[in-house]
Amino acid sequence: MSGEATADDTMRITVENLRVALAGRDILAGVELIAAAGEITGLVGPNGSGKSTLLRTVYRHLKPQGGRVLLGERDLRSMTPAAAARHVAALPQERESDFEFTVREVVAMGRTPYQKAFAGDSAADRAAVLIALVQTGVEEHQGRRFATLSGGERQRVLLARALAQEPDVLVLDEPTNHLDVRHQVELLTLLRAQDRTTLIALHDLNAAASVCDRLHVLHEGRVRASGTPREVLTPALLAEVFGIRAAVLDHPLTGDLLIAVDHRTTAAAEVPAVESSGLRR
Ligand SMILES: Nc1ncnc2c1ncn2[C@@H]1O[C@H](COP(=O)(O)OP(=O)(O)OP(=O)(O)O)[C@@H](O)[C@H]1O
């Protein structure tokens, strides 16, 4: 074997013993996971379990107090920002994009890691931007100001920017937020069709079960379970981690795992409820 890295090496993300503290409190502790090359790896977990914190550490917005994030064999923090951005693109939950820019300009920002200062757009840049605009279905909006778009349209533009970056690894924090059901399905279909390593946080467990090759369940800053959706999303785990009652079925159309949540009773509510506060209807 030569010492040269294979494509798979540069497409795999390994999170090693990660510890992140914010405001003096450990938010993540001892987190270990792998996002394998070309697979879709999902993060699920209740509010505040640390999903965004983990993703922000992977795309280098946060510096860990301990542990490492490796791209292949290389610590991502040892790379320059531009070099890291040529490999890893993010769709963050919070959007800091400048609302004064047009859609096309926002998407074109994805090309910055490839451009020399003052060099302007190359033909490759223009092609990548156009492909991303078309893939995400926002081509028709390209002349509009980002600020004038709906929440769902903005979300798709930010995905287009990440795709225009032509990364090996896509890091997506709740990318289906604000999207209507059809656009959710289209986005997940687009992700499946990409030959990229994808690390994605999702609240919708059925979407996660359908699109993810592997899932990691975060609970209170630790990985509580890892495996295929079928291995991980059991009624017992859903009760323990999410506090919900759910039946786990096979989807009649796709054969995917289908989680039928009891929207009337939480798992905790099965034990005797706290005494009435005396409030009357
Ligand atoms: N800048 C910060 N300073 C202090 N605490 C923070 C900061 N950012 C996040 N936290 C805390 O870290 C914990 C994990 O937050 P995080 O956003 O990673 O969770 P999450 O799993 O993505 O949640 P959600 O599902 O609600 O998006 C929460 O308790 C949150 O309040």
Image: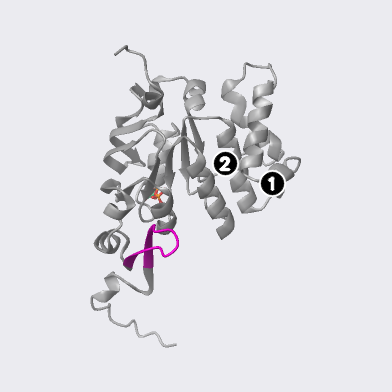
* Residue position marked by numbered label 2 in the rendering: 159
Amino acid on which the number 1 mark rests in the picture: Ala
Amino acid on which the number 2 mark rests in the picture: Leu
Q: Quadrant of residue 75?
A: top left
* Residue position marked by numbered label 1 in the rendering: 147
Q: Secondary structure at mark 2?
A: helix
Extreme residue in the right direction: 143
Disc 2 packing (10 Å; few <14; some 14–19; many ≥20): many
Instruction: Kindly identify the residue that appears in the image at 60 percent across and 36 percent down.
Output: 161
Asked whether, in this view, residue 152 is left or right of residue 250, the answer is right
Q: Position of residue 222 (x, y in %)?
A: 27, 46
Q: Position of residue 254 (x, y in %)?
A: 43, 58
Extreme residue in the top direction: 2
Q: Are marks 2 and 1 in contact (CB under 8 Å)?
A: no
Mark 2 or mark 1: which is in front?
A: 2
Q: Magenta includes 256?
A: yes
- The image quadrant where one finds the C terminus is bottom left
Asked whether, in this view, residue 173 is left or right of residue 180, the answer is left
Asked whether, in this view, residue 128 is left or right of residue 274, the answer is right
